[in-house]
Amino acid sequence: MKLAILSRAPRSYSTQRLRTAAADRGHQVKVLNTLRFGIDLSGDEPDLQFRGKRLSTYDAILPRVGNSITYFGTAVVRQFEQMDVYTPNTSWGIANSRDKLRATQILSRHNIGMPATTFVRDRADVIPAIERVGGAPVVIKLLEGTQGIGVILAPEIKVAEAIIETLSSTKQQVLIQRFVKESKGRDIRALVVGDRVVAAMRRVAKGDEFRSNVHRGGSVEKVDLDPEFEKVAVRSAQIMGLRVAGVDMLEGAEGPLVMEVNSSPGLEGIETATKLDVAGAIIDHIDNQVAFPEIDVRQRLTVSTGYGVAEIAVFEAADLIGRKLGESGLRERDITALTLHRGTSVIPNPNASHVLEAGDRLLCFGKLEEMRSMIPSRPRRTRKVKRLPKEPIHEPRDA
């Protein structure tokens, strides 16, 4: 395999470990400065220049795109995607993970547990927003902060209001988030590669500091993840379009709460804490995917006119509840079930004997018109009108 690591820090621990792991496995590997690429759109096919010359052919890339060059870095990754070069982290996955608001919106849509979060612009909306997440103390986060920078704990509502007003005056966008007291300055970093967690550590904040980032002086220790935490970490990374990711979670009273999905996780802290070859696991995953790549069915299968991929929720198609998949009539309508999602479980290529239950979700390929006809129109959201108590009727007194 010929691999390019896109990095502006060739001497950093993470880049060196990835380069060494690839070379030790007999792969050709080069570290290429992301900013030295030129995106060539002048020819008949997508191409890239590097240091002013046409880039040679690569089997795969591993993006280590820094926060300060997200726009240009994702454009370079997107061009490699157009050239059919494998990347474990998609360009849209990197872009989504860098925007904390967008990432939170995506994860919440898929029922991933997170600390209560809100986003407002107008000063008049700040206090109601703080009350919605549970009141002070609250955590205020810059949308594009990293390594704990731009994360502030406001102990009181007035302090929070002043901080947000100050940041807004400098054109900074912020999230308001519930402070999870039970986490006690600790969090979990799970390193996801493909469909599994290859290493996990607990980060503990130093002294009175509530941020547990290693860059803020936090300490690290190896941790054996509970299966629930592992499932949430893997699912969060995959929802974001990342096959290599660091998923940061708080240990909430009711289970894991995802704080962030990092597309370029550092390896030094987690390899030191766990003594595991995380870099090697990343290289092995890329090698396996180059040999037998996964296909994004949403993009590849929609080329057939009138056919595509869609998700059918069984509670929406009520006539499917209690039926075996083979008796559901899907085949007769030219629809094939690819996977069956039930709670946190995924059943690939479900057979005809599976009985469908309320709440199941079927990822299907087939005629879009047929699948569309199975989903009833969505009911409009209605707001409950608060009725004011009726004023008492005062009867006139007899004269």
Image (spheres, helix red, strand yellow):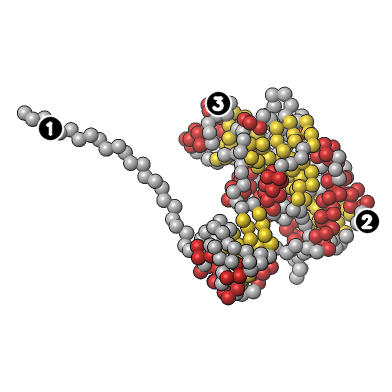
7 and 263: which is toward the camera: 263
Q: CA distance from mark 3 to mark 1?
A: 52 Å
Residue at which label 2 appears = 26
Q: CA distance from mark 1 to mark 2?
A: 99 Å
For the C terminus, the image quarter is: top left
Q: Position of residue 343 (x, y in %)?
A: 61, 53
Left or right side of 363 for 279? right
Between disc 3 and disc 1, the foreground one is: 1
Amino acid carrying label 2: it is Gly
Decide: marks 1, 2 in contact (CB < 8 A)? no
- In the displayed structure, would residue 278 be above or below residue 346? above
Would you call the spot at circle 1 few (<14 residues within 10 Å), some (14-19), or many (20 or more)? few
Q: Position of residue 24 (x, y in %)?
A: 93, 51
Could you tell me how many numbered marks the image carries?
3
40 and 101: which is toward the camera: 101
Would you call the spot at circle 2 few (<14 residues within 10 Å), some (14-19), or many (20 or more)? few
Amino acid carrying label 1: it is Pro
Q: Secondary structure at mark 2?
A: loop
> Of callouts 3 and 1, which one flags the residue occurring earlier in the amino acid sequence?
3
- Residue 357 position by quadrant: bottom right
Left or right side of 163 for 232? right
Residue at which label 1 appears = 396
Decide: marks 3, 2 in contact (CB < 8 A)? no
Residue 156 tag number: 3
* Residue at position x 36%, y 41% in the image: 386
143 and 332: which is toward the camera: 332
